[in-house]
Amino acid sequence: MAKHQPKKIVISRTDSIGDVVLTLPMAGLLKEQFPLCKIIFLGNRYTRPIIQCSKHVDEIWEWAEIERMDYNDQLKWLQLQEVDTFIHVFPRREIARLAKKAEIPMRIGTAHRLFHLLTVNKLVNFTRKRSDLHEAQLNLKLLTPLGMKGSYALKHLYEYVGFENIPPLKAVFSEQMDIHRTNVILHPKSQGSAIEWGVEKFMELAQSLDQQKFKIFITGTEKEAAAFRSVLPQQENVVDLSGKMSLEDLIAFISQADVLVAASTGPLHIAGVCGIHAIGLFSDKKPIHPGRWKPLGKQITILKSKKSEPDTQPLSIHLRDVIKAVETTV
């Protein structure tokens, strides 16, 4: 039987920033294996700025735009795209049904979703919950129906992200950077995506770092800022940028900084693939441990809370360990 040679591949991952970043190596590996294929990433409007940064993605579809259409219009539109391969990285019943109804020839998905038994014609049997593999490695198991290997060394996956189309940094933000000091981003909150270290610990960290050596920027959404804006250290070297940036601005700013400290959340993954020093604060419990969710990158430092601790915030990572991790980047 002739080997399947895809010409137009859809990677479907319609969840959050970190998940999308950890799916981007799939686009790079597919481009390496099938250089002439077109890679389409189906994602959320919110994550579009992340996807746009990858040089391996040729086109982006926003699920919200497709979802607005009448079902028959969705079907006609998808059929006109002439997609031959559809990879369900993040399983969604309605998307799986649509891809089947459009008669896309190869539809790949995990065997651990009942609705895939009726909608997917290339089932891959693996489990995420009980696996010791990293999320990025688990995603790539879905490439086996394309004749590609399903096992990749984690240390090499950063090379396939292709995070090169970074937007320019606006002058209003670039002027805040200090070329004479190490520019450190502290991102205290996680929008509920992780067990956090605690706002008070981040504020202690900001106060503890040498003001002559470090310029500190606090980032987060306007809603998150309500948890820390009133307790920010009133120091010359501390700048509050929370609620002032779009995601494009944040990506650009992170790429120009030196260090970012955060729990297991989107900005930590952005820092990793931007190539700056990313210091991740994690719980060591499955399935949220760093072995599964640490960022991809060349300059990654992971600090862990112990497994034996109860499932409550904050993480019990000692302040001195975080200070040391930041200071060693100078």
Image (spheres, grey):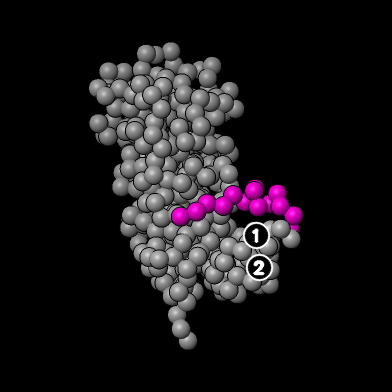
Q: Quadrant of residue 97?
A: bottom right
In the displayed structure, 141 sits above or below 315; it is below
**Residue appearing at x 56%, y 58% in the figure:** 12
Q: Quadrant of residue 57?
A: bottom left
* Amino acid bearing label 1: Trp
In the displayed structure, 245 sits above or below 47; it is above
Mark toward the viewer: 2 or 1: 1
Instruction: Compare marks 2 and 1 and give the one earlier in the sequence.
Output: 1
The magenta region covers 58-71
Is 69 inside the magenta-drawn segment?
Answer: yes
Residue that label 2 marks: 102
Estimate the spatial distance between the alpha carbons at disc 2 and disc 1, rounded to whole Å: 9 Å
Q: Quick one: SS at disc 2?
A: loop
Q: Quick one: SS at disc 1?
A: helix
**Residue appearing at x 53%, y 40% in the figure:** 195
Residue that label 1 marks: 77
